[in-house]
Image: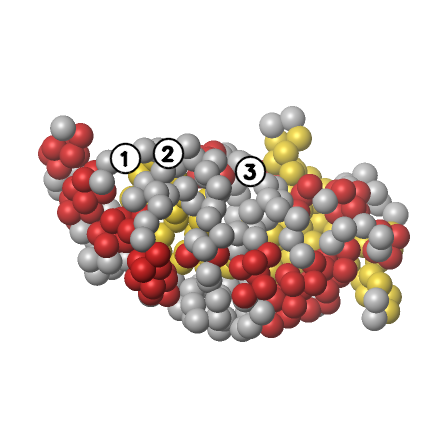
């Protein structure tokens, strides 16, 4: 019945639909009917935290789409015969984007989601679910410009080496705002110059320092929410030696009061964006963009 309604309601525009998302549980037949209704899909998404789905059947259907470039899938799926692994992996290798969302079901150790390696050369964006995947990716993936890291305790050494091997990376989505020393350094109330070495015993210190050095960062733009206002804080970065930098807050204001004349003059910028719950991020009024900055790297 739903498919019939969609077919009638969207008759004049369904050929133009490029992104399609299915939420929660669905039958084997349902995605087949949807895909036939929207033949020009570029990105297909499955968001289902509690319900599993038939991964093999879904990929068989998606393989018929001529314009498909990427998928965003939940990690909970029904068990399938092991011999289907190669088919799934070959499908993933054909994509430009492979994003994954952890569901409330455990991920099998042999899951194709954990077998991403240097052979996935077409990917420009991807999700790295854990250090097992990160260890498989200690190579250059020349087209890769963005990665997602779910909230897990990532290996600093593996991630630092991965970034070193992939200098073309421009964006990393993670939860860096949860790191205490970053919160303290970027505090808008700290107007005195501080040295990063004060925090060298803190987790992720070496990683952050390596990223700042690799991209030759001179300014950091951070945003956060305070009393329903989006606030930005600009921190100046000065190198005092090979292994240390000084940071100081030089600009602090509400987003809608930014002096863009001042901001457009900044070069070699790292943007540290506030982290939102994924489910709400698309309609979140605070999810602003910073393309007006000459940024080299973005943390979400």
Q: Say which label, 3 or 1, has the lower sequence index.
A: 1
In this picture, is 288 found above or below 293? above
> Can residue 100 be seen from the camera position used here?
yes
Q: Secondary structure at mark 1?
A: loop
Q: CA distance from mark 3 to mark 1?
A: 27 Å
Circle nearer the N terminus (2, 3): 2
Instruction: Give me the residue at 76% from left, 42% from top.
Output: 180
Which one is in front, 148 or 51? 51
Q: How far from the left and from the top, in percent, is residue 32?
A: 19, 44
Q: Which mark is residue 51?
A: 2
> Callout 1 environment at 10 Å: few (<14), some (14 to 19), or many (20+)?
some
The answer to the question of whether label 2 and label 3 lie on touching residues, with beta carbons closer than 8 A, is no
**In the rendered image, which quarter is residue 132 located in?**
bottom right
Q: Mark 3 = which residue?
A: 276
Residue at 72% x, 44% y is 179
Q: Nearer the viewer, mark 2 or mark 3?
A: 2
Determine the CA span between mark 2 and mark 3: 23 Å
Q: Name the residue nearer the viewer: 70 or 191.
A: 70
Residue 246 or residue 43, whichever sits in front: 43
The image shows residue 160, relative to residue 172, as above or below, that is below
Residue 160 x %, y %: 67, 64
Q: Residue at x 16, y 37 (%)?
A: 10
Instruction: Please say if 214 is above or below 132.
Output: below
Real-space Cα separation, disc 1 to disc 2, in angstroms: 8 Å
Q: How many C-alpha atoms fall within 10 Å of the one at disc 2: few (<14), some, or many (≥20)?
A: some
Tag 1 residue: 26
Residue positioned 47% across, 46% down in the render: 107
């Amino acid at each position: 019945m739903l498919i019939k309604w969609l077919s009638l309601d969207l008759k004049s525009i369904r050929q133009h639909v490029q992104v399609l998302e299915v939420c929660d549980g669905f039958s084997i037949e349902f995605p087949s009917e949807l895909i036939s209704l929207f033949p020009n899909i570029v990105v297909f998404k499955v968001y289902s935290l509690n319900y599993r789905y038939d991964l093999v059947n879904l990929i068989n259907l998606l393989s018929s789409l001529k314009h498909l470039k990427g998928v965003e899938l939940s990690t909970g799926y029904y068990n399938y015969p092991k011999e289907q692994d190669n088919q799934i992996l070959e499908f993933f290798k054909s994509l430009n984007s492979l994003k994954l969302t952890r569901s409330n079901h455990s991920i099998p150790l042999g899951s194709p989601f954990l077998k991403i390696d240097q052979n996935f050369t077409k990917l420009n964006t991807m999700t790295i679910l854990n250090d097992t995947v990160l260890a498989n990716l200690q190579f250059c993936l020349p087209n890769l410009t963005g990665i997602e890291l779910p909230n897990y305790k990532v290996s600093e050494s593996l991630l630092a080496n991965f970034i070193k091997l992939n200098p073309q990376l421009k964006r990393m989505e993670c939860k860096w705002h949860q790191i205490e020393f970053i919160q303290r350094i970027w505090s808008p109330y700290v107007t005195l110059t501080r040295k990063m070495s004060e925090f060298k015993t803190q987790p992720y210190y070496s990683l952050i320092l390596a990223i700042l050095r690799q991209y030759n960062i001179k300014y950091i733009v951070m945003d956060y929410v305070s009393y329903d206002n989006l606030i930005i804080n600009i921190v100046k970065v000065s190198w005092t030696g090979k292994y240390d930098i000084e940071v100081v807050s030089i600009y602090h204001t509400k987003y809608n009061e930014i002096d863009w004349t001042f901001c457009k003059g900044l070069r070699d910028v790292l943007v540290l964006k506030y982290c939102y719950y994924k489910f709400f991020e698309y309609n979140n009024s605070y999810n602003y963009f910073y393309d007006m900055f000459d940024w080299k790297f973005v943390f979400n």
